[in-house]
Image (cartoon, rainbow, N blue to C red):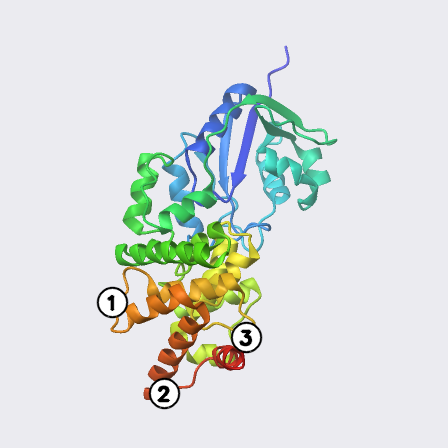
Amino acid sequence: MQEAREKIGIYGGSFNPPHLGHLHAARFFSETLRLDRVMIIPAGIPPLKNPCGVSGEDRLELCHRTFPFEVSDIEVKRSGVSYTVDTLREIRALAPGAELFLLIGTDQAEAFTLWHSWEEILRLCTVCALQRDGVPLQTDLPLRVLGGFSPLEISSTQLRRRLLLGEDCSSWLALAANAYINEKRLYHPLPPKRVRHSRCVAEAADALACRYGAERVKAYEAGLLHDCAKYFSFEEQEALCTQYGTPFTLYERTARGICHAFAGAAYAAMELGVTDEEVLSAMRWHTTGHAGMTLLEEIVFVADLISADREYPDVERVRKLAGVNLHAASKYILEFIFTKLEKRGKTAHPESLAWYQEMREL
């Protein structure tokens, strides 16, 4: 009688962070396929994603604290860009007689032909994809589709946003993983005072959007996330913008106090799941403005200075202006900024000057 081959499931991902939805999926794969082993493999430098600010070692530890399965560092310790096909080759060499199952989700299956050497992946293993209840998987590839799966409605992107804003995420994280995140302050949680400011700006932006006819959902989101990179180091802010394709100008390198706005837009796009370019642009220009400001951009610029938590001497005057004439409020704010900079012997951002001149000519 021929001995049964060992069945190894390979479940990879950024796991940034790993959550109970990942655990639910891993258990479903293990039970449905009757796997002998499940290997959890956090990505090193994934080709389609790039975790920012959380090391491979931390994500490994989070996986150890989340999954009751084998956790492998095979990709984290690999130098350079990490491809699934390389991982499968290594596992095949270590377990030549095993039957390999690559475990992926519906979204990954739909983009499978974008993977590096996807044809070879199909030769090295059986690719198993989860099919969500009521959501048929459209593919002509020879994948093994597993039906009957009901996912937990949470994503790592949503968790990164919640963690940034200091929200309780214990319902979606393993207890030990949640404790580790809190202990090491992963995912750049904002201090409580900054969280309050962010929520106040979001509310002010929402009110201005209602007053002037902008899209309230976009205004609220831009206001809520506008300071998401406020506490990154300047080096981290610069690296984010360079990676995003919006490197700092020579002026911006000498005016570090405004750079969190540019870095925040980059971080929101790459790590917080913000895809709306209008929202990202409103975040990007909230410290300086620029010539040709859109209504949404101007709303967030002004909201940042009239939010309920602001207490500077002229704030009530600016609030009244904002309720009557948004441009008048913007001009007043710019003049205030110019005066402060002049006292310090500094000049304003070129885009601030261009916008101010533009408004004077209206």
Contact (CB < 8 A) between labels 3 and 1?
no
Question: Closest to the observer: 233 or 341?
Answer: 341
Q: Please name which of the two marks, 1 or 2, marks the residue nearer to the observer.
A: 1
Q: How far apart are marks 1 and 2 (CA)?
A: 22 Å
Q: Which amino acid does label 3 sit on?
A: Ala
Q: Distance between the residues labelled 3 and 2?
A: 21 Å
Q: Give the labeled residue for mark 1.
A: 311
**Residue 60, placed above or below residue 50:** above
Q: Give the labeled residue for mark 2.
A: 342
Mark 2 Cα-neighbour bin, 10 Å: few <14, some 14–19, many ≥20? few
Q: Can residue 218 be seen in this view?
A: yes
Q: What residue type is labelled 2?
A: Glu
Q: Which of the two labelled residues, at mark 3 and mark 1, occupies the earlier sequence position? A: 3
Q: What element carries label 1?
A: loop
Q: Residue at x 53, y 39 (%)?
A: 12
Q: Which of the two labelled residues, at mark 3 and mark 2, occupies the earlier sequence position? A: 3
**Residue 109, placed above or below residue 59:** above
Q: Which residue is drawn at 42% across and 70% down?
A: 287
The quadrant in which residue 6 appears is top right
